[in-house]
Amino acid sequence: MIFCSRVGCHIGGIAVNIFAYADDIVLSAPSWHALQDLLSLLDKCCKELGMICNTKKTKCMILNPTDKTKNVSQSVPHFTIDGHCLQFVNEFRYLGHIISNNLCDDADIKREIHNMYVHTNMLIQRFRKCSQHVKIVILRLTVSVCTVLHCGLISVVVL
């Protein structure tokens, strides 16, 4: 119902208004009014299915335009679902990635680098007592498995 509404951002003549994965949904709209219409449709769909939207976990974000002259208004009325106001945020985590309203991915890159250091240190600790020969065999096996699985990025760490 939401997809067929034709409300949303139009890309190549197609209304792109909903991204869904499991129980996570992102609604996308070019204006405040359009997004409120999508939220109302979402609420209607949920009620028809006997579901409710958790308004405590639902967040709103306005992506800041890169060209500040295209900013129409500095304030936006609150969005509502079933009469409940939704919280505005500057960034949130979606499917494990940090999305920010300034269209910058610095926080997500910092998080990924931190995770890489954590995992590298775990590997170093786990295999620190192994001989150099065993470490080389494990590294070769890891690289060959990643190659078979068509990994796009392989990080090599000398243990």
Image: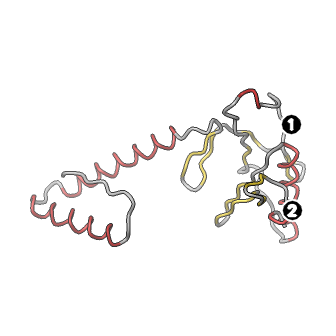
Binning the other alpha carbons within 10 Å of mark 2 as few (below 14), some (14 to 19) or many (20 upward) gives: few
Q: Which residue is mark 1?
A: 77
The residue under the point 74% across, 59% down is: 18
Residue 71 location, quadrant: top right
Q: Secondary structure at mark 1?
A: loop
Q: CA distance from mark 1 to mark 2?
A: 22 Å
Tally the marks: 2
| Residue 143 placement, left or right of 18 | left
Circle 2 sits on which residue?
5
Dot 1: few (<14), some (14–19), or many (≥20) neighbours within 10 Å? few
Q: Residue 60 placed where, x, y %?
A: 74, 44
State the residue at coordinates (43%, 47%). Answer: 112
Inspect the image, locate mark 1, and give the three-letter code of the amino acid beneath it.
Answer: Pro
Task: Please state if 50 lies on the left or on the right of 141 as rendered.
Answer: right
Q: Nearer the viewer, mark 1 or mark 2?
A: 2
Which residue occupies the foreground of this view, 45 or 10? 10
For the residue pair 32 and 116, the one nearer the viewer reads as: 32
Q: Residue at x 67, y 64 (%)?
A: 23
